[in-house]
Image: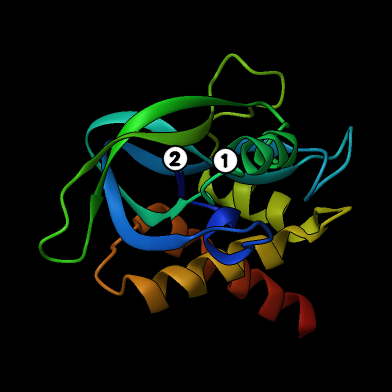
Amino acid sequence: MWVFGYGSLIWKVDFPYEEKRVGFIRGFSRRFWQGSTDHRGVPGKPGRVVTLIEDPEGCVWGVAYKLPSGREQEVKEYLDYREKGGYRVINVTFHPKEQGKKPMEDTLLYIGSCDNPDYLGPAPLEMIAKQILTSVGPSGRNTEYLFELADSLRQLIPEDPDEHLFSLERRVRELLDESIK
């Protein structure tokens, strides 16, 4: 059983796995449109974390993890709990970056669909940036989530041009610099 991570599952790997592979899935784009009241925000003042939106031309880079043999259900139950804030599970085809590795069908993907109660949806970049800048929850500051994700993707997949993520990171850093002056 494989699970694809495209957000905090890339940089906050707090579960056991046998193997990991960098690669991508097609047909989606990553967006900070999912609200977080259980990790990066609180009820009434949600943070923003990533989900995927359907996009026929889209390609989302991330990491797939092979869950430990004999412990798949146990680890999946942990991930179900961790990703409980509006996420559901679907199956996708994962394409490893490594040459010679075949695409893996039936890779699990946690996705926050637009019909879940924590879905915030699209908003102007400036509004999303200000919400991320001021949000904090039980797992820490929302800015940490954004910066860790951007840094991890730059290190793992320097060719990933995720414009939404990197323009949002630039704007939040600008706002932080302005608040210090």
* 87 to the left or right of 98: right
Q: Which residue is mark 1?
A: 72
Circle 2: element type: loop
Q: Are marks 1 and 2 in contact (CB under 8 Å)?
A: yes
At horizontal 43% and vertical 62% (from top left) the residue drawn is 19
Residue 104: percent from left, percent from top: 26, 42
Going from N to C along the chain, the mark reached first, 1 or 2, is 2
Circle 1: element type: helix
Tally of numbered tags? 2
Residue that sits furthest to the top in the current view: 115
Location of residue 135 with respect to 181 vertically, above or below: above
Q: Residues within 10 Å of mark 2 (few under 14, many from 20)?
A: some
Q: Which mark is residue 1?
A: 2
Residue that sits furthest to the bottom in the current view: 181
Residue 78: percent from left, percent from top: 72, 41
Distance in Å between CA atoms under marks 1 and 2: 7 Å
At horizontal 66% and vertical 41% (from top left) the residue drawn is 79
Q: Quadrant of residue 56?
A: top left
Nearer to us in this view, 18 or 100: 18
Residue 6: percent from left, percent from top: 46, 51
Nearer to us in this view, 5 or 103: 103
Residue 48: percent from left, percent from top: 67, 45
At horizontal 62% and vertical 58% (from top left) the residue drawn is 16
Q: Which amino acid type is shown beneath numbered disc 2?
A: Met
Location of residue 29 with respect to 16 vertically, above or below: above
Image quadrant occupied by the N terminus: top left
Q: Which amino acid type is shown beneath numbered disc 1?
A: Glu
